[in-house]
Image: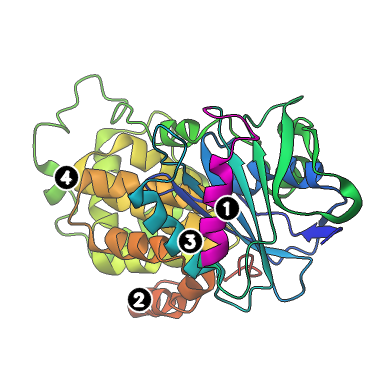
Amino acid sequence: MHNVTVVPFRGPAVSLSGRTVAYMTTDPRTVTFRDPGDLIAAVPAMVGFIPERSLVLLVFDASGTRIGVTMRHDLDLDSDGIATEAMEVMVAHLCEICLRDNTSGVIALVIDDRFDIGAPCWDHLFALIDSGLEDVGLYTGFVVADMALGQPWLNRWGAMGTHGDRGILDDPRSSAMAVAHAVTTGRVVLRSRGEMVDSTARTTHCADPVCTYAVDSRTKTAAIGVDDSELLRRVLDVVLHGLDTHVDCTQLRILEAAIRRPPVRDALLALAVSDVADAAEAVWAELTRRFRGGGRACAATLLGHLHYVRGDGAMAGVALDCALDSDVGCSLAALLDRSLRAGLRPSTLHELLPTSYAAADKLGVIMPAPAERVAG
């Protein structure tokens, strides 16, 4: 594993309750890392943000030179730096995910500023991972206090050939992987997962000076007399032409009523693999910020599904957290949440997309055609 090839993400990876699962895409562009420092500096681009006090697992596919899955979880340690019982359970779960899909090897990275990078406690954590990986074992384990320029990193477990067991970290925000990530997605590596959460923060409902959205029930009656076919067409029109910054209350109420109709919502899931996916993402994000309760949950679910399909695990997790916080009874969000926690690949959702096109066809609406598949 001296030269490691990584396929750039179409977007960042995922976070649910402190956990991140990232999937590589089928984008033909690659980044090759020739030493451990390059690989460590690339981790923020792989997960979409700069992790802190985290365990990151890089899982190699059958070729032994290509990273197929990246996972991150908050480090839960006791006062001596030893993994808590809950952390041990989580490590076992992450190892189960690692052992899927003909995995050839795993590299672990610890990011933590509470204990010295050479502290013996890391041996305990790496041994735990090594045991959980059974016959595959942990190839090597690195420790760094902070993912920042000039920070020393240490190879605490295993070896990386002739490259040495320590070094100084380059700036992760300008690493080769970060540049590839920005070129591929148009996005920069965020400073923290909190920035992702902020992207779904609630804003005002509409441009109307007097808006009673939060205190009345007109949203549920806004679309009375409008059939599902027309509602789907209205949402598609907004996706294709954009949502006006000064959108009025009536239009927003109709859009909310539309995405809360199961047949309409099911058809809209198909946009996640279409040429207008970026436009749909912008609309779902804006509606997530503007709506409350069930409407916010539905918009956030559409957003989470889109990111999940893309392999953008981190944003998928943030959006699904938002959906379930807004409406714990949102069944689709709960299903996607369970799938993400179980480490199911985006390809699993691709297999369900024909159902979305069938829903649109039943409503007599032609959806944008699928784009080239981007996530494995």
Which callout, 1 or 2, points at the residue further toward the start of the chain? Answer: 1
Q: Is residue 97 above or below residue 116?
A: below
Contact check, label 3 and label 1, Cβ < 8 Å: no
Which callout, 4 or 1, points at the residue further toward the start of the chain? Answer: 1
Q: Nearer the viewer, mark 1 or mark 2?
A: 1
Which callout, 4 or 3, points at the residue further toward the start of the chain? Answer: 3
Which callout, 2 or 4, points at the residue further toward the start of the chain? Answer: 4
Provide the residue designation for mark 4: 219
**Amino acid type, callout 2:** Ala
Provide the residue designation for mark 3: 94
For the point 70% across and 67% down, the residue is 26
Could you tell me if residue 135 is visible in this image? yes
Measuring from the top left, give residue 277's x and y in whole percent.
Answer: 54, 56
- The segment highlighted magenta reads 114-131
Measuring from the top left, give residue 72's x and y in whole percent.
Answer: 52, 49
Quarter of the image with the C terminus in it = bottom right
* Circle 1: element type: helix
For the point 38% across and 68% down, the residue is 267
Provide the residue designation for mark 1: 126
Which callout, 3 or 1, points at the residue further toward the start of the chain? Answer: 3
